[in-house]
Image: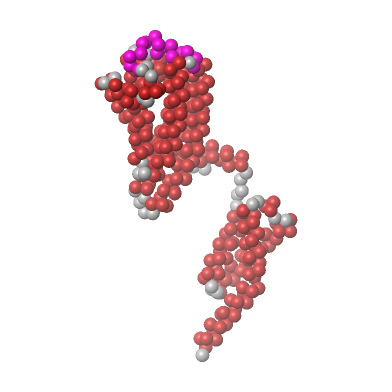
Amino acid sequence: MNAPVSVDGVRQSLASFRSERERDWKAFEELIARAEKRSPKALTDEELLSLPVLYRSTLSALSVARATSLDNGLIAYLESLSLRGYFYLYGARRGLIERIADFFVHDWPSAIRDLWRETLASVALMVLGFVAGFRLVAFDKTWYDAIIPADLAGGRGPDASVEWLRQGLYDGGGGYLSTFAAYLFTHNVQVSILAFALGFALAVPTVLLILMNGCILGAMFYVFWSKGLVYEFGGWLFIHGSTELFAICIAGAAGMRIGTRIAFPGSLSRIKAAAKAGRVAASAMVGVAMMLMAAGLLEGFGRQLITSDGLRYLIGGSFLALWLAYFYLVQADTGDEKT
């Protein structure tokens, strides 16, 4: 007969415990939810002052519940509520400026460093595509029209005169080269977005996009190489291409990170592995967008206004060195986050 009495006693104790304190828990939960959903301004002065009191009351209830082992479900609820309260009351809340600064100081360069293997693979793919495009056009000039869109080429390819091609490199923005530059920038932005967005398909579309982008560059380089203008064309492209092409390689690396994690999730589920990789890739892609904007300014103004080959190479090389130092040499004290 003792067992039923003991069970009834526990039930009565639990019911009494809940009835005495549950109102405070619910009030605390409602205030935290309202403040999290909106802001502290959504609470009155009295409600703000009551938050620490209700938090201590919740901790006290949690301590009693753990000591008496009243109910596992109740203990889990109080632990969750106490944790929410702690992070809201004592957690570090950073303003917009601090968050932006943290992104540039830590999140972005840390994400790029984490993607170093995929970035090297992306660079290798672009170089491979470049060589393929160059050799294809060198082998058969008709490949040029197959690689470069016909409406853009307009017959101005391997058969164009040296004088006409040279003039396009220094005409301050007019002519065929400016049209090609606008196309190339738009194309590269699209390639960057698609290389990242299609990474989930086991990275296959990403690899093909990077290869194709290299083919376009290789085909164009052959035209100017065959006319003895490769140095001049390299300067024309390098002033903005050092930033633009690097951004594409990073976008490809981000896509490959997601694709490879889906294909080889390791001990995690595929969804969790993709989500984990996506956090790093997303930080990298926010930076890629800014790199492409910088490349657009260099292409729209620097390349048009600067006609010195040496100065073009100097500016392009300086930006490349700046990116490399920022991403790989200068590290924040907080260190990198590993995925």
Q: How many marks?
A: 0
Q: Residue 321 location, x and y as percent?
A: 46, 26
- The residue at the point 36 percent across, 41 percent down is 203
Q: Quadrant of residue 195?
A: top left
Q: Is residue 238 visible?
A: no
> Camera-side residue: 140 or 211?
140
Residue 166, compared with residue 125, is above or below; it is above
Magenta-highlighted residues: 157-173
| Quadrant assignment, res 151 | top left
Residue 54 in percent (x, y) is at 66, 63
Residue name at image x 46 percent, y 13 percent? 170
Q: Nearer the viewer, residue 161 or 215?
A: 161
The residue nearer to you, when weighing 140 against 320, is 140
Residue 274 counted in the magenta span: no
Q: Position of residue 82 (x, y in %)?
A: 59, 61
Question: For residue 221, what is the image quadrant?
Answer: top left
Residue 33 position within the rendered picture, expressed as x and y whole percent measured from the top left: 62, 57
Query: What's the residue at 51%, 33% (across, down)?
Result: 290
Task: Return the residue found at the far bottom.
Answer: 1
Q: Is residue 269 visible?
A: yes
Taking the image as shown, residue 102 lies to the left or right of residue 224, namely right
Q: Is 163 situated above or below 268?
A: above
